[in-house]
Image: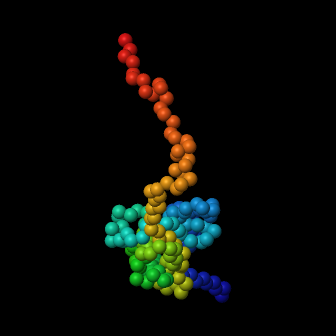
Amino acid sequence: LPCRGSSAYPQISQSYHSLFYRKTKSGAPGQIISKQFVISKDTFEFGPLLVGKEKEEREKFPENLDNFRITNSGLFPLHVDFCFLLDRDQETFSVDPSSLDLEPEETRDITVMAFPKAPGEKQDKLICNIANNPEPVEINISCLGDVPTIVTNLSLSKEEEEEEEENPPLPPHPRELEAPRNRR
């Protein structure tokens, strides 16, 4: 009596093509990447974000939010819980909703947020714990906390003062000084 069998776990798609709406191979030197999955780094980068914003007011800060697509690519209905590996209290990174129930081939969005509290790079992993699957899915995430700085120079250096004296601004051209003529 020939007999065959197969086994499978509930699973979500792990392809960056289906998880992320925006992706790039890599950034050029000096290029600022914002809210994109960087294929060469295998990381979703929020990019530079201002420090000190409150996530309770997240509707005001779309640059701090992005949606990820979660697709049940398995054969069974599944339940998945989301958390972060390092930021367990979700102080910098957070996700909404914190869990999903998906039928096979169903896709739904989750919103991932980054609200850095201090300047500097912050990295973490979004952990997708799928019920009845022993291997969680991990998604690398990073953001760069930034504080704006303003540099002012209210006094001219001696060199700039000497240059002003040697090369005073040009007077206006005579045509610019003429009054408009009345035309008949």
Nearest the eye: 41 or 164: 164
Residue 177 x %, y %: 43, 27
Q: Residue at x 39, y 71 (%)?
A: 52
Q: Is residue 38 left or right of residue 94?
A: right
Q: How is the image coloured?
A: rainbow
Quadrant in the picture for residue 67:
bottom left
For the image, the number of numbered tags is 0
Farthest residue toward the right?
2
Farthest residue toward the top?
184
Work out which quarter of the rendered image holds the C terminus and state it: top left
Work out which quarter of the rendered image holds the N terminus and state it: bottom right
Q: Is residue 116 left or right of residue 133?
A: left
Residue 179 x %, y %: 39, 23
Nearest the eye: 14 or 53: 53
Quadrant in the picture for residue 63:
bottom left
Residue 9 x %, y %: 54, 82
Q: Residue at x 59, y 72 (%)?
A: 42
Q: Is residue 30 visible?
A: yes
Q: Is residue 72 visible?
A: no
Nearest the eye: 100 or 179: 179
Q: Residue at x 52, y 56 (%)?
A: 157
Residue 69 x %, y %: 48, 67
